[in-house]
Image (spheres, rainbow, N blue to C red):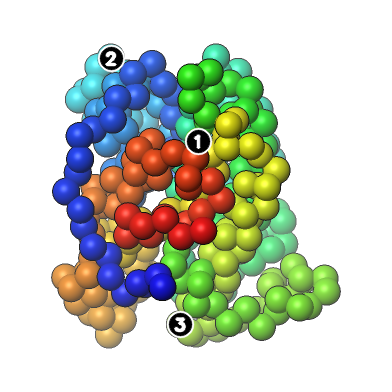
Amino acid sequence: MIDMARTANRPAGPAPSLAGKTTIITGATSGFGLAAAHLFATLGLSKLILGVRSVERGEGAAASIRKANPNIEIGVWQLDMLDYRSVQSFAKRCETLASIDMAILNAGIYKLDFARVAVTGHEETLQVNYLSTALLAILLLPILRRKHAQASPGRLTIVGSALGLTSKFPERDTVPLLPALDAEWAGIAAASERYAVSKTLIFLLVLKLSQLASPDDVVVNVVEPGFSGSTNFSTGVGGALKLVLRVMHLLIGRTAEQGAWTYVDAAVTRGEETHGCFLNNWEIYP
């Protein structure tokens, strides 16, 4: 049974070497994504690609990583998860890389208020957390299959949440499904449900991708980084809820760096046994 309340920490083991490898991390200007970018850069990477909505903010994040790791090549590439065209352009740019060994799709949002994306017409949480993430994963999968190092399979790790196992998902039998998921909602409970549903869909996506890709070519998995008050998850939260989140962080929270180590575990340390699986609190769930 998955323990969704606990976010146990584990001492970092011997750091795996990523010498000569190329890694992509999306949503890398804050929170777990930024911490992961700093962490992966220390593991001997040859090249690090940061997929960011704001190139200016991305360059600011990259500057400190370059200073601490002068031998690494860092690319800051625009990736707007609210726009399919930006996702497609990012994937096409990835085609130009000589090699890609792993991609960590970390970009995601939690919205307290309903918003509709003007370009696509979809609800914003669904758009970022699932639709654009799914498109990027589908586009990157064949690139990873072709361009990973021959000695080991490519890695596609998508950031999920154990909350995806708690969604009520009353729309699940609706045909067609997307219009139902785009319906307006209001309130904290509805916001949490929409976030949870977006992560439920990520589980389904990873299961399907794992059926389409051989683990000999690309290992596809989903990881829960844990709860942290040091990320942007609670941006825009105020009042009593903000106090509750602070208490939760003190009781069960991880730092952003501790959460980033779960990305290393899922994308580097573990192997084919995680294909199509969910990694949570250092355990593998099929």
Q: Residue at x 39, y 41 (%)?
A: 270
Q: Quadrant of residue 230?
A: bottom left
Q: Residue furthest right?
A: 175
**Residue 112 appears anywhere in the view:** yes
The secondary structure type at the circle numbered 2 is loop
Q: Is residue 149 left or right of residue 44?
A: right
* Eye-nearest disc, 1 or 3: 1
Residue kind at label 3, given as amino acid type: Ile
Name the secondary structure under disc 3. helix
- Residue at point 40% right, 26% down? 48
Pointers 1 and 3 in contact (C-beta within 8 Å): no
Residue neighbourhood size for the residue with mark 1, other residues' Cα within 10 Å, grouped as few (<14), some (14–19), many (≥20): many
The amino acid on which the numbered mark 1 sits, given as a three-letter code, is Arg
Q: Which residue is mark 3?
A: 188
User: Which mark is first along the chain, 1 or 2?
Assistant: 2
Instruction: Reply above or below: 259 against 18.
Output: below
On screen, residue 5 versus residue 183, left or right, reads left
Q: Are marks 2 and 1 in contact (CB under 8 Å)?
A: no
Residue that label 1 marks = 155
The structure residue drawn at horizontal position 27% and vertical position 85%, both measured from the top left corner, is 240
User: Residue 40 placed where, x, y %?
Assistant: 31, 33
Please state the horizontal and vertical placement of residue 249, each as a whole percent of the image: 22, 69
In this view, the residue in front, 125 or 98, is 98
**Who's the residue at 48% across and 32% down the image?**
102
